[in-house]
Amino acid sequence: VAHAFWDTAGILKDYLFTWSLWKQDEKSKIKMAASPGGDEDSVFDAGRLSLFDLILERTRAQNKKQLVHRLVYVSKIRQDVSDRKEIGAHYERVFKELQTQVHGEAVTGLLLIYPVHIIHVVETSYNMLLKVIKELEEDEQSASGMLLNTKLLVCTGDLNNRLFGQWSFRTLNLAVSRMQEFTTNEPIDVVVTEALTLIIKLAEYLAKLPKISLTNTMDQLPEKVPDLLVRQDLIEYTLGSQDLNTPSQYLKRYTTPVDITLESGKAT
């Protein structure tokens, strides 16, 4: 089941970094094994740094409280939402409350509010992301909620770099397109990769702008960078996919203990 997809650059960076740490770890093993008077079991001494220790050390060196993860999801806006800016204001309140309740990393990202959809990128620690996903589940089940049919496009772990320096939202003034226009024979992972690639390109473009022009560009994304915005009919297509996790499916899959009955525990 296609439930999460990773950007190629992120995979390559993580692979190269992990490989370099592994090489350091292997050198440490060889040095300890060859030490005078050492025996074969000295390789497994408790004092030897493991790959996990090295990753934690990198995290501390970057002043991170916890590892940073990235969540990207799409949702449909309920028809009774009269002011789309209320969605952004809602998340401002949610993140402010979570920062006081949960010990985790600061929230960065971007919420793009289309005429009938949203795309939301959230970067923070995993315990915070779980709270966001649970909030999405509750929002869909609530009569006063603002979003429907949420699908999680990706949940990426242990990021080397964030895409955004802060969290913000923008409402996009676009004409509502015909939602049946997008058709493809490609599998859903290819479609999701196309959407994620545009998000990454948009983030890279915004990161290069001087601060003096960033706000103006953010306020005019459809006019300034129309080619870097995910098409509305593509978003609608992903919402109809059965291969992407809903918030409830994700929470059940990754937070519910596996219920296994051992043979020895069965009644005879």
Image (cartoon, rainbow, N blue to C red):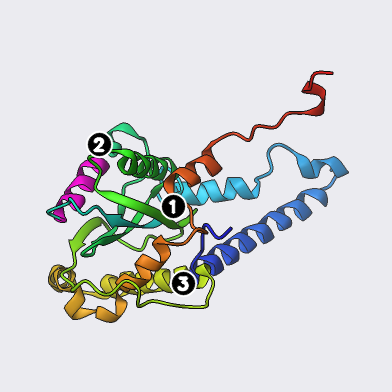
Q: Quadrant of the C terminus?
A: top right
Q: Viewed as shown, does residue 59 lie left or right of 222?
A: right
State the image quarter where residue 122 is shown. Answer: bottom left
Q: Choose between 121 and 14: the one closer to the eye.
A: 121
Question: Which one is closest to the eye, mark 1 or mark 3?
Answer: 3
Specify whether residue 93 is painted magenta: yes
For label 3, the crowd category at 10 Å Cα-Cα, with few meaning under 14, some 14 to 19 and many 20 or more, is some
Where's residue 183, x and y in %?
Answer: 43, 77
Identity, as a three-letter code, of the amino acid under mark 2: Glu
Q: Are marks 3 and 2 in contact (CB under 8 Å)?
A: no
Identity, as a three-letter code, of the amino acid under mark 1: His
State the image quarter where residue 24 is shown. Answer: bottom right
Residue at the image position 47 percent from the left and 62 percent from the top: 241
Residue at the image position 60 percent from the left and 60 percent from the top: 18
Q: Which residue is mark 3?
A: 191
Q: Which residues are magenta?
A: 84-96
Q: Which mark is residue 97?
A: 2
Q: Viewed as shown, does residue 268 lie left or right of 163?
A: right
Q: Which residue is mark 1?
A: 69
